[in-house]
Image (cartoon, helix red, strand yellow):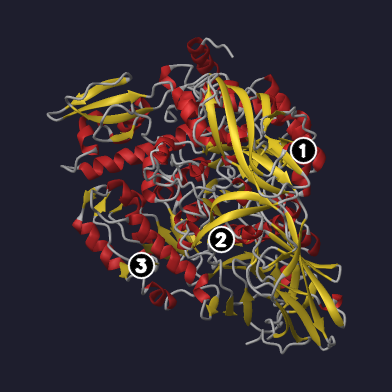
């Protein structure tokens, strides 16, 4: 694309100033109102509508084809998705926003419509949002990101630096980001404080979607996702030392002056040093930063979307901690109040330390009447995230008021580096894909439940964000203090919201002894440990106190008011506040405000709740936060209208509770969500039976010893080591990781012929063996054991572009080599040509077929990263130093990984017999799998499918399939891509956060540590931070004895108290 950038830009700004102008004030231009959704009935419970289903990030990441898009979209519908976000991603070859791009967008929308699911959009090429694939920063330097840098006076100025002040020690410069960033396609990031820049971004990345898909429709049916926009001071010259960086823009300087009546340049030093009135200056600086970013970006785009029938959604960078919020986006809650569908990011296989993030979102949405709240979730969790993990993370979101799930990530292509793009992938590539609808139905049910009615918390916790603004070096941590208060409230089943001081200043009032913020009103205020409080907040609290309101403090009370120390105000506040501690908070609360539900039991604190009300009745949502342990609880609550019902999204069944009771006993499985309804909300439930706690069971058979086994898919081995020669030489290197060869040649910018030689040891030649290549067209010569081989692939493996060909006749017993010659071109990630950005993607190759893979075992790893979290059932990670192809066997002890299938990705059937002398009709019989490692386990008895198990309890009723005498139990285990694709060589063994760097020794997010020259350190036998030549594989199979048990048909009723 050729553009006269400067002329186009300024012409555009003049033409669109009015059409994109931003309203004054902090409220929305069009505010959504909360609605009472129809009560859930049996039909919508069993098969939830598309609107409540997951909408994954669909990673558009290759040369795109309309037919392939249509095929994959149809698969999304079958897999239980309700829609998808079309996300330009690393690997995209089709020109972003070019003619072919729009053909693909139209094809995707059309395919979605035909399948009955919704295509949604994304506002950027990769992320973070704002630069429009490089178009915006190329328009004018005025649109490029800036930061304020403090340099020592003797430091040479880098290109792009403008001096704005000096003192005896430091020079203060405004630095304009320079082109050349790989992540920005050779350009740089942009100044999101600049409303004119944002208008240009909207013109480039929003308007084309509106023109093609939404204008004139009269309703906002399409959403557009913004991803990690920020104003963080991170784009500074990497070769220039500095003594501090802060966000900056001429627009921020202007905003500060407008708000405060003086120039920020007069106080630059106070942003870095703790002298004079530095706290007040910093407070005003960060307040101006937050307000300007909201006005320029979030509010402007939200209003434009509302006027053009688009739904503004997505999430911002750095939402998970007050310091990150301060530095990267100013104030997350201000952004959320503007978005039609606000959202957050939830990365990794964890629910720890995320409460503030989720509650900031749901609180703002509650106050501004926004029904739908998004989370981009499951990203970087690794390929082995299972259905229980997804239950766990999604259930946590639902109980915290977040009800629209955007799974990260669904890959269009796994070719090259794409397969390592922050896994997992939720796509046809996974062996478990045909079972995905089972978990998606579950997630849709809980999203629906979390959307019904309204949430009416009684408690408001004031955010200490502005204390974070003014804290000095060595002063206390406000994020941890705030989180501890929220955890106490969660663990003791109080409903609450967070109050932001800017939002309170804009909208809060006191009426009839309650603080009202938008649609919410509160009876009690909690102040966590704070350093600072606004005068407006103080006055609000004073009015609330005079009307009989209750204010509690759980730590240090603020001694700074509007940034200035004010002991008189502090003393006034002390008279109004009941001081307590996080540990004694619930005792103080109990005498003043009643929790909406009382839960007792040894694990009562691990069960969280949310109470939702409608004119038709109450819905009490319950979630077991423990990933490993069930919870048996005694629950007491008021259920107006009677008719209490338990809804179990795992089984899609409803159970009747005693009609006149308000106290019940429930069992909650690990990571499980249940809800109880009352009144008219229960009317349309299709009741299965009265609710009972599970009865005691007795063993009648133990299936120990060997299992007979049969794989249902080809076995595989990943060949990720090779030797190479560059140029036309014949001398090969020592064998090393293929990903290291790519890294080295890329660093050297080598361009020319390259020959790769992959070794593989074969102890017994298989009856069938196929070679799988990702891009066979790259290779102009291929030899197997020295013999020329013409690759005419007639099949595929895992990905439609992973082509396979039979090589059985070419194999020999012993050492084999597969040699391929190609022309190597190094990647040019800063190129404007997307085809040049990724270079020649040399990768692992694969063998598939009828064989076993024998590993050379090393001592297993018990302290993997995953085990160290303490959140999961402990699993030893298998370690191997090498492999060979050998013959398969028929009998197995249960764990298939060390028994011939370390790389296997597919389904495997194990069978075992057991004998029952007679089947007693007074009993029900169960198959129990105490410890199984798979994504899905399909249980079959005597040829009849009894159940498909994906989450606890791994137990199913097999009564009707049994017979007297010998019975055959079959368990078909389905695993993931983890053991095939890795990461195999990370010293952490099995990870809970996985990124592209986890597959190399380079590190980077989320690994942090690493070495850019890891491949050379490895050759030199030097220690590396995360890379190990050892292979790490997780178990796959039955890890403990399977039990056949029984219990009486009609257990004693134990649900009533």
Of the two numbered discs 1 and 3 in the rendering, the one whose residue sits closer to the viewer: 1
The secondary structure type at the circle numbered 2 is helix
Task: Name the quarter where the C terminus is drawn.
Answer: bottom right
Image height check: is 55 above or below 912? above
Circle 1 residue: 809
Label 2 and label 3: CA atoms lie apart by 27 Å
Are the two marked residues, 2 and 1, in contact with CB atoms closer than 8 angstroms?
A: no
**Tag 1, which secondary structure?**
helix
User: Closer to the camera, 298 or 568?
Assistant: 298
Q: Please state which of residues 753 and 244 is positioned toward the viewer in this rendering.
A: 753
Say if 637 sits above or below 510 in the image: below
In the rendered image, the quadrant that contains the N terminus is: top right
Give the Cα separation between the discs numbered 1 and 3.
79 Å
**Viewer-proximal residue among 608 and 538:** 608
> Measured from the top left, where is residue 528 in percent x and y?
35, 61
The numbered mark at residue 552 is 3
Residue corresponding to mark 2: 396
Horizontal side of residue 332 vs 889, given as left or right: left
Give whichever of 888, 427 is nearer the camera.
888
343 vs 58, left or right, is left
Residue 964 position in % (x across, y down): 87, 83
């Amino acid at each position: 694309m050729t553009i006269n950038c400067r002329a186009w830009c300024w012409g555009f700004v003049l033409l669109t100033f009015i059409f994109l102008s931003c309203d004054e004030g902090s409220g929305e231009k069009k505010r959504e109102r909360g609605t009472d959704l129809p009560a859930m009935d049996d039909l919508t419970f069993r098969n939830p509508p598309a609107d409540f289903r997951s909408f994954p990030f669909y990673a558009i990441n290759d040369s795109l084809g309309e037919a392939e898009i249509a095929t994959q979209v149809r698969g999304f519908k079958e897999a239980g998705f309700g829609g998808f976000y079309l996300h330009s991603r690393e690997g995209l070859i089709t020109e972003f926003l070019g003619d072919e791009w729009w053909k693909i967008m139209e094809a995707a929308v059309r395919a979605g419509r035909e399948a009955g699911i919704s295509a949604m959009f994304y506002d950027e090429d990769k992320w973070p949002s704002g630069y429009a694939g490089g178009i915006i920063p190329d328009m004018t330097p005025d649109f490029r990101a800036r930061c304020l840098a403090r340099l020592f006076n003797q430091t040479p100025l880098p290109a792009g630096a403008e001096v704005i002040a000096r003192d005896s020690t430091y020079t203060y410069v405004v630095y304009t980001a320079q082109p050349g960033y790989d992540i920005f396609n050779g350009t740089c990031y942009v100044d999101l404080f600049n409303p004119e820049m944002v208008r240009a971004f909207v013109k480039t990345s929003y308007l084309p979607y509106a023109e093609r898909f939404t204008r004139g429709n009269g309703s906002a049916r399409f959403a557009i996702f913004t991803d990690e926009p920020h104003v963080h001071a991170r784009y500074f010259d990497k070769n220039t030392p500095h003594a501090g960086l802060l966000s900056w823009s001429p627009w921020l300087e202007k905003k500060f002056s407008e708000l405060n009546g003086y120039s920020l340049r007069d106080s630059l030093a106070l942003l870095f040093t703790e002298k004079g009135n530095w706290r007040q200056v910093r407070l005003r600086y960060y307040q101006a930063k937050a307000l300007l970013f909201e006005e320029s970006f979030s509010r402007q785009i939200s209003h434009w979307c509302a006027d053009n029938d688009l739904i503004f959604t997505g999430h911002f960078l750095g939402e998970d901690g007050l310091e990150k919020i301060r530095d990267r986006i100013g104030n997350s809650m201000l952004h959320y109040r503007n978005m039609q569908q606000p959202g957050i990011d939830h990365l990794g296989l964890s629910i720890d330390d995320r409460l503030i993030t989720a509650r900031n979102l749901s609180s703002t949405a509650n106050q501004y009447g926004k029904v739908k709240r998004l989370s981009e979730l499951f990203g970087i969790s690794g390929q082995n995230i299972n259905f229980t993990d997804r239950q766990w993370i999604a259930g946590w979101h639902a109980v915290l008021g977040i009800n629209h799930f955007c799974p990260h990530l669904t890959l269009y292509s796994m070719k090259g580096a794409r397969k390592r793009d922050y896994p997992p992938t939720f796509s046809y590539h996974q062996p478990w894909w045909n079972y995905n609808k089972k978990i998606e139905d579950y997630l849709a049910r809980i999203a629906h439940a979390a959307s019904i009615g309204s949430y009416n918390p009684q408690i408001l916790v004031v955010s200490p964000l502005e204390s974070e603004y003014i804290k000095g070096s060595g002063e206390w941590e406000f994020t941890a203090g705030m989180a501890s208060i929220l955890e106490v409230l969660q663990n003791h089943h109080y409903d609450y919201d967070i109050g932001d001081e800017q939002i309170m200043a804009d909208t809060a009032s006191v009426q009839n002894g309650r603080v009202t913020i938008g649609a919410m009103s509160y009876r009690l205020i909690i102040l966590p440990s704070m350093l600072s409080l606004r005068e407006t907040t103080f006055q609000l609290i004073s009015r609330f106190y005079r009307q009989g309101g209750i204010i509690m403090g759980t730590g240090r009370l603020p001694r700074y008011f509007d940034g200035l120390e004010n002991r008189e105000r502090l003393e006034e506040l002390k008279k109004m506040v009941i001081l307590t501690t996080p540990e004694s908070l619930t005792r103080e609360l109990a005498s003043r405000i009643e929790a909406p539900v009382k839960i007792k039991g040894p694990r009562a604190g691990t069960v969280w709740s949310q109470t939702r009300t409608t004119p038709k009745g109450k819905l009490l949502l319950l979630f077991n936060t423990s990933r490993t342990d069930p919870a048996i609880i005694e629950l007491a609550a008021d259920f107006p209208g009677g008719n209490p019902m338990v809804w179990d999204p795992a089984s899609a069944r409803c159970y009747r509770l005693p009609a006149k009771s308000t106290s019940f006993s429930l069992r909650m499985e690990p990571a499980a969500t249940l809800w109880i309804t009352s009144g008219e909300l229960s009317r349309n439930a299709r009741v299965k039976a009265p609710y009972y706690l599970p009865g005691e069971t007795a063993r009648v058979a133990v299936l120990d010893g060997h299992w007979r086994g049969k794989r249902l898919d080809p076995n595989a081995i990943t060949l990720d080591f090779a030797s190479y020669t560059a140029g036309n030489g014949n001398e090969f290197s020592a064998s090393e990781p293929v990903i290291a060869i790519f890294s080295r040649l890329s660093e050297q910018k080598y361009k020319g012929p390259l020959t790769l030689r992959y070794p593989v040891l074969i102890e017994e030649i298989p009856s069938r063996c196929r070679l799988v290549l990702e891009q066979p067209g790259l290779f102009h010569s291929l030899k197997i054991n020295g013999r020329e081989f013409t690759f005419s692939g007639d099949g595929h493996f895992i990905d439609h572009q992973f082509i396979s060909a039979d090589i059985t006749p070419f194999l020999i017993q012993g050492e084999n080599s597969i040699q391929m010659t190609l022309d190597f071109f190094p990647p040019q990630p800063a190129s404007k040509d997307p085809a040049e950005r990724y270079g020649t993607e040399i990768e692992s190759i694969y063998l598939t077929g009828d064989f076993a893979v024998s590993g050379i075992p090393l001592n297993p790893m018990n302290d993997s990263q995953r085990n160290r979290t303490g959140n999961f059932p402990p699993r030893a990670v298998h370690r191997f130093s090498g492999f060979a192809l050998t013959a398969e066997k028929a009998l197995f002890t249960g764990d298939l990984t060390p028994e011939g299938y370390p790389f296997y990705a597919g389904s495997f059937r194990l069978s075992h017999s057991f004998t029952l002398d007679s089947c007693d009709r007074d009993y029900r019989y169960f198959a129990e799998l105490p410890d199984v490692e798979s994504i899905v386990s399909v249980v079959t008895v005597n040829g009849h499918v009894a159940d498909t198990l994906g989450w606890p309890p791994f137990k199913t009723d097999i009564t009707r399939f049994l017979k007297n005498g010998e019975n055959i139990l079959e368990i078909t285990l389905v695993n993931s891509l983890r053991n095939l694709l890795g990461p195999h060589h990370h010293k952490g063994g099995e990870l809970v956060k996985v990124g592209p760097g986890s597959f190399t020794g380079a590190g980077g997010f989320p690994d942090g540590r690493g070495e850019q020259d890891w491949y050379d350190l490895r050759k030199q036998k030097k220690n590396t931070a995360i890379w190990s030549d050892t292979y790490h594989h997780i178990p796959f199979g039955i890890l403990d004895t399977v039990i056949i048990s029984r219990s009486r048909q009609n257990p004693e009723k134990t649900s009533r108290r």
